[in-house]
Amino acid sequence: MSVRYELREAAAWVVIDREERRNALNPEVTAGLLEGLQRAASDDPCRVVVLTGAGDKAFCAGGDLGGFQAEASAHEQHRLRGQLGEVFLAMQALPKPVIARVNGHALGGGYGLMLAADIVVAVDDAQIGTPEIDVGLWPHIITAVIQRNVPRKIAFEMMLTGRRIDANEAERWGIVNRAVARGELDGVVDEYVETLAAKSPAILALGKQSFYRAQDMAFPEALAFLNSMLSLNLQAEDVAEGVSAFLQKRAPEWKGRYPPLCEPG
């Protein structure tokens, strides 16, 4: 198996397990990532997904240039390459937060996977970038997530030149949430899992859906959509429970049921 699924208390860990290939992407990996995300969506004990790579050298070193079967038709190869885009869509549609645990280099498609996560925690010596230009390629598919997560001039410079940055610089640009020493990586990831698992799963799902759908709307349409989402939010049982718990100075007991007329995804 190129991708492992491990349930660790409230977190489902989806692990690219190709350490010998620096966790490079191929059709088996992208299919495994899709399967893992689908499993996490229906796994009730899972409240958060942690996406990472095996070992300590690479989160994901990008596409495996030798990973496509030469005997496959051009149409089939086109479809298989498009699976990475399907992974990005599945990460966005997942009604549970996704944390990228960047344990090493995140290059090319691995950079895209990192950016498609909701929260990114990276070891400070991880190299991040789009080296495709150096082998005569352009990072076409991951452009969609780069444009939505990286400042324009920094993004285009990295794509044009192949320049890599470390996680500390990425943190300064807001590309990762936290750049940490290697010995602190799992502790910080666990803190995020604990924090997110303590929130209402229904409202996290509603908020994630709201955030991503609004980002591609024109400003007036976004405001109207977000007003509708607020109305749905206010119908959720967890709103009353959250307010009561706050006033009573106790931890809330979330019901986790979605507001009427609203389903995640």
Image (spheres, rainbow, N blue to C red):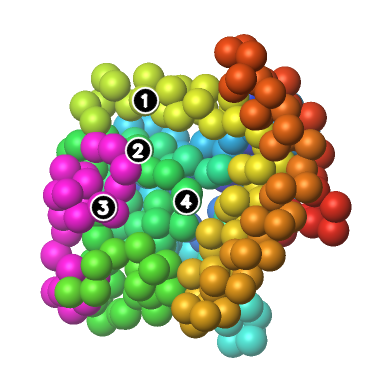
- In terms of depth relative to the viewer, which is nearer, 79 or 237? 237
- In terms of depth relative to the viewer, which is nearer, 116 or 141? 116
Q: Which residue is mark 1?
A: 188
Residue range of the region highlighted in magenta in the rendering: 154-179
Nearer the camera: disc 1 or disc 3: 3
Label 2 to label 4: alpha-carbon separation: 10 Å
* Crowd rating for badge 2 (residues with CA inside 10 Å; few <14, some 14–19, many 20+): many
Q: Residue at the bottom extreme?
A: 74
- Residue 142 x %, y %: 41, 70
Element under disc 3: loop
Q: Are marks 2 and 1 in contact (CB under 8 Å)?
A: yes
Element under disc 1: helix
Nearer the camera: disc 3 or disc 4: 3
Q: Residue at the right extreme?
A: 260
Q: Is residue 180 rendered to the left or right of residue 85?
A: left
Snapshot quadrant of residue 100:
top left
Q: Is residue 195 rendered to the left or right of residue 133?
A: right
Q: Hey, what amino acid is under mark 3?
A: Gly
Label 2 to label 3: alpha-carbon separation: 12 Å
- Residue 261 x %, y %: 85, 58
Element under disc 2: strand
Q: Which residue is mark 3?
A: 174
Q: Hey, what amino acid is under mark 2?
A: Val
Residue depicted at x 60% and y 51% = 207
- Residue 225 x %, y %: 63, 70
Q: Which residue is mark 2?
A: 121
Q: Identify the image quadrant of the N terminus.
A: top right
